Image: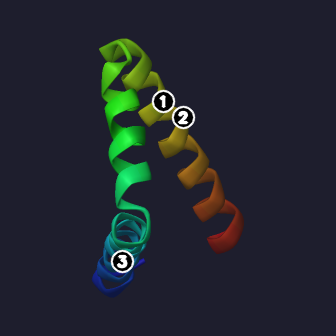
Amino acid sequence: MNWTDLLTALGLAAMIEGILYAAFPDATKRALSEFMALPADTRRKAGLCVSAVGLLVIWLVRG
């Protein structure tokens, strides 16, 4: 992996997030509001689970 791969991945993540905000602004606001209402520990666990799934996907794709 090099810097180009990292910057490409960050750009893709920003693009997907931006598309979701543009396409579904009200639903995004509701989802973020509900997520922020969760306890910090639950949000932390959710973040770790999403990170683990992302790592698994990278491992499966890149070997």
Specify the label residue 15 is tagged with: 3
Rate crowding at label 3 as few (under 14), some (14 to 19) or many (20 or more) other CA atoms within 10 Å. Answer: few
Find the distance from the CA under tag 2 to the CA under tag 1: 5 Å
Q: Give percent across and percent down for residue 60.
A: 71, 63
* Depicted 37 relative to depicted 11: above or below: above
Q: Nearer the viewer, mark 3 or mark 1?
A: 3
**Corner quadrant of residue 35:** top left
Asked which secondary structure carries label 1, the reply is helix
**Corner quadrant of residue 30:** top left
Check disc 2 and give the amino acid type: Cys
Q: Tell whether label 1 touches label 2 (CB within 8 Å).
A: yes
Task: Give 36 or 25, whichever is nearer the viewer.
Answer: 25
* Depicted 24 relative to depicted 61: above or below: above
| Marked residue nearer the N-terminal end (3 or 2) | 3
Dividing the image into 4 quarters, which one contains the N terminus? Answer: bottom left
Check disc 1 and give the amino acid type: Ala
Q: Give percent across and percent down for residue 31.
A: 42, 40
Specify the label residue 49 is tagged with: 2
Rate crowding at label 2 as few (under 14), some (14 to 19) or many (20 or more) other CA atoms within 10 Å. Answer: few
Find the distance from the CA under tag 3 to the CA under tag 2: 22 Å
Q: Residue at x 38, y 24 (%)?
A: 44
Task: Give 36 or 12, whichever is nearer the viewer.
Answer: 36
Find the distance from the CA under tag 3 to the CA under tag 1: 22 Å
Q: Residue at x 36, y 83 (%)?
A: 8
Task: Give 28 or 6, whichever is nearer the viewer.
Answer: 28
Asked which secondary structure carries label 3, the reply is helix
Q: Give percent across and percent down for residue 57.
A: 64, 59
